[in-house]
Amino acid sequence: MTPLLCFIYSYTKSFPRPGESVVGASFEAGPGGKGANQASQIARLGGRVIMIGRVGSDIFAPVNIESMKQSGVITDYIEKDPVVNTATAMITVTSEGENSIVVTLGANLELSAQRAEEMEPVIAKSKIMLCQYEIKFPALKKALEVAKRNNVKTFFNFAPGVPDFDKDVLKLVDYLCTNENETEFLSGMEVHSIDDAKKAAKYLLGFVTTAVVVTLGGKGAVLATPNEVKYIPAKPVKAVDTTGAGDSFCGALAYLLVYKPELPLEEQVQRACFVASISVQSKGTQTSYPYAKDLPEEWL
Ligand code: ADP
């Protein structure tokens, strides 16, 4: 149960004032959305992944679907909304590097709890269900319930974080992954250091069944399990564009949970960090995600 979204970037000298038109220097549009990104990363690593999502009937829908297909994602269960448009993020970037963003979640918000019920036969045959939070709460909750009643493992990436999230639903979650901001939203604790992240991860572990991972950008991640809370450093790299690093990480970790179950969780998190560290070394989101062939042999 995952979200799709298209990005539209306009590069201008300055932001338009209300009522003003400014001439843009350049324009870019591309696919995105946390679910679409994560599914693409899984497929690029060689995983079989089915996307359950919703787009509009507009010009952005094929861009998103085509991009996922090219990575190898199964897109047959993505619904097309006849009325509401595909989710978009309109980003204006000035020559000073400032940005302003309007996100419209559009068709993502029309993905319903009923759709989660309808998808039960598909979810039931899966090894893991990976969810994000760019959809409505009832749809998320129902999808988690459907997975759990079919003994399917659940992985929830609480992104983007929001305040006042009902943590009771986390009892349906096996693996929880949050970045620093999302961790603060969910735990109500400030996260400025690795020690802060460890404390928050330990606290959040009390709400889920198996493990909590807090990602810390270039610093790596913290993994909390009932046995221990451990810091896992990231490989130092020259980062060019960190957009979508968290999605690369979640996709890689979900892949490893299913396809490398023999590895200890700590090793799986370390390898997911490695995959995400590749993604930050080139521009773009889905396009920066590595394929299996881009990884060292010992990784596979
Ligand atoms: P999000 O994109 O959700 O904010 P993070 O910024 O925490 O997520 O990044 C997710 C993961 O990507 C990190 O745990 C790390 O493994 C990797 N990563 C992110 N930024 C860098 C970086 N500058 N250098 C190396 N790895 C990075």
Image (tube, helix red, strand yellow):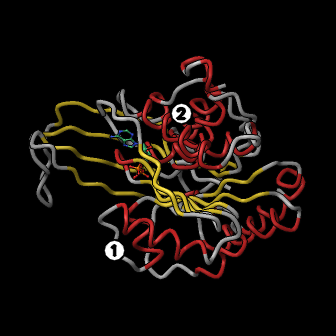
Q: Nearer the viewer, residue 168 or 88?
A: 168
For disc 2, the neighbor class at 10 Å (few under 14, some 14 to 19, many from 20) is some
Given this view, does label 1 or label 2 mark the residue nearer the observer?
1
For disc 1, the neighbor class at 10 Å (few under 14, some 14 to 19, many from 20) is some
Question: Which amino acid type is marked by label 1?
Answer: Glu
Residue 162 lies, with reference to residue 41, above or below; the image says below
Residue annotated with mark 1: 190
Q: Nearer the viewer, residue 13 or 246?
A: 246
* Whether the residue under disc 2 has CB within 8 Å of ligand 1: no
Q: Residue at x 44, y 72 (%)?
A: 199
Q: State if disc 2 and disc 1 touch (CB < 8 Å).
A: no
Q: Is residue 191 rendered to the left or right of residue 136?
A: left
* Whether the residue under disc 1 has CB within 8 Å of ligand 1: no
Residue 147's image quarter? Answer: bottom right
Furthest-front residue in view? 227
> Which part of the image, by quadrant, shows the C terminus?
top right
> Which part of the image, by quadrant, shows the N terminus?
bottom right
> Mark number for residue 63?
2
Residue 154 lies, with reference to residue 93, above or below; the image says below
Image location of residue 163, percent across then percent down: 43, 78
Question: Which amino acid type is marked by label 2?
Answer: Val
Image location of residue 233, percent across then percent down: 42, 45
Q: Nearer the viewer, residue 249 or 117?
A: 249
Q: Is residue 68 rendered to the left or right of residue 188?
A: right
Mark 2 lies on a secondary structure that is helix
Q: Residue at x 89, y 62 (%)?
A: 150
Image location of residue 36, percent across then percent down: 58, 43
Mark 1 lies on a secondary structure that is loop
Image location of residue 159, percent across then percent down: 49, 60
Residue 116's image quarter? Answer: bottom right
